């Protein structure tokens, strides 16, 4: 097992079953690295860089990502609960889309971020704040958005096929070319001043 050190670069390494709690990892860059069954609970990542990395079956709940950058990074079957993604670096923010597959993103926030092309597939995204977020061409298929917030969000050409429990007001969000499937799409109509006849 390799411990992760601050002010260090790692390339093409696999980290297995690392466990960090209430720790600080700063100014560290990861290139084409893989994290498997790692625990980073309440870890403070500061000014770290992740390029072409994969997190599989990891737990990063309550971690911070202040001034961090992610490029083509994938999270699979991981817990990412309570993360404020809006703390990421604005200069190098998500140069290529983030990918989330079968993850728990509950109680997080992405406020104000540009997330064009992001993939959030078969996830739980309960009580997540997507206010003022650019989700153009986002792939959100089969994700549960219970209690999540969409305000002034750009969902142009976003795909919500088989997603559920979303509450998206078309009056305050951009939905041009977005895809939704029935019966969940009826929730969008409920925000409009119309009468639905069953």
Image (spheres, helix red, strand yellow):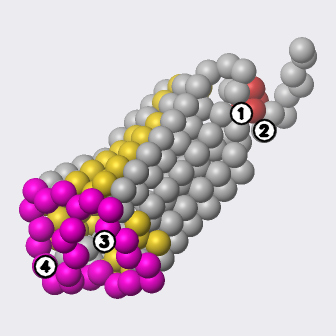
Question: Is residue 183 at least partly visible in the picture?
Answer: yes
Q: What distance separates the C-alpha of mark 2 from that of mark 1?
A: 6 Å
**Badge 3: few (under 14), some or many (20 or more) residues near its Cα, within 10 Å?**
many
**Badge 2: few (under 14), some or many (20 or more) residues near its Cα, within 10 Å?**
few
Question: Quick one: SS at disc 1?
Answer: helix
Question: Quick one: SS at disc 3?
Answer: loop
Quarter of the view holding residue 3: bottom left
Q: Is residue 81 above or below residue 166?
A: below
Instruction: Mark 1 or mark 4: name the one nearer the start of the chain.
Output: 4
Q: Is residue 175 magenta?
A: no
Q: Quadrant of the N terminus?
A: bottom left
Q: Nearer the viewer, residue 156 or 144?
A: 144
Instruction: Mark 3 or mark 1: name the one nearer the start of the chain.
Output: 3
Label 1 belongs to which residue? 188
Question: Is residue 170 at least partly visible in the picture?
Answer: no
Label 3 belongs to which residue? 68
Label 2 belongs to which residue? 191
**Badge 1: few (under 14), some or many (20 or more) residues near its Cα, within 10 Å?**
some
Q: Nearer the viewer, mark 1 or mark 4?
A: 4
CB contact under 8 Å: marks 2 and 1: yes
Residue 30 coordinates in the image, percent (x, y): 17, 65
Question: Quick one: SS at disc 2?
Answer: loop
CB contact under 8 Å: marks 3 and 4: no
Instruction: Mark 3 or mark 4: name the one nearer the start of the chain.
Output: 4
Q: What distance separates the C-alpha of mark 1 from that of mark 4?
A: 48 Å
Instruction: Mark 4 or mark 2: name the one nearer the start of the chain.
Output: 4
Label 4 belongs to which residue? 8
Q: Which residues are magenta?
A: 1-27
Residue at position x 71%, y 33% in the image: 188
């Amino acid at each position: 097992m390799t411990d992760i050190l601050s002010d260090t670069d790692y390339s093409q390494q696999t980290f297995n079953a690392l466990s960090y709690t209430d720790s600080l990892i700063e100014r560290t860059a990861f290139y084409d690295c893989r994290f498997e069954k790692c625990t980073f609970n309440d870890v403070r990542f500061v000014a770290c860089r992740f390029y072409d990395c994969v997190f599989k079956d990891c737990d990063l709940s309550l971690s911070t990502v202040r001034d961090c950058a992610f490029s083509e990074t994938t999270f699979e079957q991981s817990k990412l609960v309570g993360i404020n993604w809006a703390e990421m670096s604005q200069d190098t923010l998500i140069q290529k889309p983030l990918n989330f597959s079968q993850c728990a993103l509950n109680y997080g926030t992405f406020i104000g971020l540009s997330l064009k092309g992001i993939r959030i597939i078969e996830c739980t995204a309960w009580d997540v704040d997507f206010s003022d977020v650019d989700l153009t061409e986002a792939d959100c298929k089969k994700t549960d958005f219970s209690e999540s917030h969409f305000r002034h969000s750009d969902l142009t050409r976003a795909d919500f096929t088989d997603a559920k429990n979303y509450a998206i007001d078309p009056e305050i969000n951009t939905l041009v070319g977005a895809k939704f499937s029935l019966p969940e799409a009826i929730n969008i109509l409920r925000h409009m001043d119309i009468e639905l006849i069953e």
